[in-house]
């Protein structure tokens, strides 16, 4: 049983996705590992954890735009980039989030969207046929403009030959990004109450691994 809106935290969403989406056997690469918060409590086999930040002590220190992995080896890539550009705040205001979210490792522009095509090109090279990318993204407002990061990402996927955006899950965090705390006197957007989990396949929208009729409704 899967819902397209999940009221829960990342480990809940991730374990639901791991169980639901068929993928080929192959390596699992988490290319933005940080402290592996999203894997908390999820029983899993071998995962290759990488990150650009050596202070996070990743198994492999590398840039997700130049992955050191062999072509055609991946069954699944997890991508959870910093959700704000470096330019989104002052050095002082960003400081608490630097280590936790890698905010000093991201773009200087108004949007993080320039990382998408280089990352997706690498991901496509590394994945096997039918391999998947699970991507976590949040929208944000910067420079008095709502940055439609989901739209930018889907357009980037369409621009890479052979990759298909296949599905979307909306995660609503129980704490709703503090919107429920009463701290906000004036709020213009509910963007902090949800984030996107996007599923991208190297191949067609539906997996060729699915047997005919397997996903059909029984009644
Ligand atoms: C939002 S955090 C990931 C949190 C992680 N998924 C977890 O569960 O703990 C984003 C991570 O992306 C890393 N990062 C930023 N730019 C990167 C790049 N170009 N290549 C690889 N990692 C990068 C940051 O160092 C940071 O650790």
Image (cartoon, helix red, strand yellow):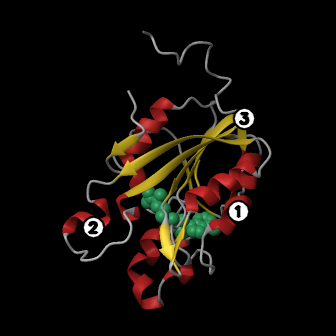
Name the residue located 65 percent from the left edge and 64 percent from the top edge.
Answer: 62
Name which residue lies at 45% across and 31% down: 19
- Could you say which quadrant of the image residue 14 lies in? top left
Q: Nearer the viewer, mark 1 or mark 3?
A: 3
- Residue 131 seen by the camera: yes
The answer to whether mark 2 is within 8 Å of ligand 1 is: no
Nearest to N terminus: mark 3 or mark 2 = 2
Q: Residue 203, labelled with which disc?
A: 3
User: Considering depth in this image, is 9 or 154 the residue closer to the camera?
Assistant: 154
Alpha-carbon neighbours of circle 2 within 10 Å: few (<14), some, or many (≥20)?
A: few
- Reply above or below: 55 against 31: below
Assign a secondary structure to mark 2.
helix
Q: Which mark is residue 178?
A: 2
Q: Residue most toward the left?
A: 182
SS at circle 1: loop
> In what element is the residue under mark 3?
loop
Please give the name of the residue rendered at 38% of the width and 42% of the height, measured from the top-left corner: 5
Mark 1 lies within 8 Å of ligand 1 (Cβ measured): yes
* Rendered location of residue 137, percent (x, y): 51, 58
The answer to whether residue 70 is visible is no
Q: CA distance from mark 1 to mark 2?
A: 33 Å
Q: Marks 1 and 2: which is nearer the front?
A: 2
Q: Nearer the viewer, residue 23 or 172?
A: 172
**Tag 1 residue:** 65
């Amino acid at each position: 049983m899967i819902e397209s809106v999940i009221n829960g935290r990342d480990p809940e969403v991730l374990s639901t996705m791991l169980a639901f989406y068929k993928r080929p056997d192959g390596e699992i690469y988490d290319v933005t590992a940080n402290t592996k918060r999203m894997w908390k409590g999820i029983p899993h086999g071998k995962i290759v954890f990488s990150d650009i930040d050596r202070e996070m002590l990743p198994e492999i220190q590398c840039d997700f735009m130049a992955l050191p992995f062999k072509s055609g080896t991946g069954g699944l890539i997890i991508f959870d980039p910093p959700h704000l550009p470096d330019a989104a705040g002052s050095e002082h205001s960003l400081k608490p989030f630097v280590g936790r979210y890698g905010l000093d490792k991201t773009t200087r522009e108004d949007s993080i969207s320039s990382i998408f095509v280089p990352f997706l090109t690498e991901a496509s090279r590394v994945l096997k046929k039918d391999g998947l990318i699970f991507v976590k993204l949040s929208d944000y407002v910067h420079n008095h403009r709502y940055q439609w990061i989901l739209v930018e990402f889907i357009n980037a996927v369409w621009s890479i030959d052979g990759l298909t955006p296949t599905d979307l899950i909306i995660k609503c965090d129980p704490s709703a990004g503090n919107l429920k705390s009463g701290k906000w006197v004036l709020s213009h957007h509910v963007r902090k109450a949800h984030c996107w989990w996007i599923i991208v396949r190297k191949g067609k929208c539906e997996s060729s691994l699915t047997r005919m009729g397997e996903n059909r409704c029984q009644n």
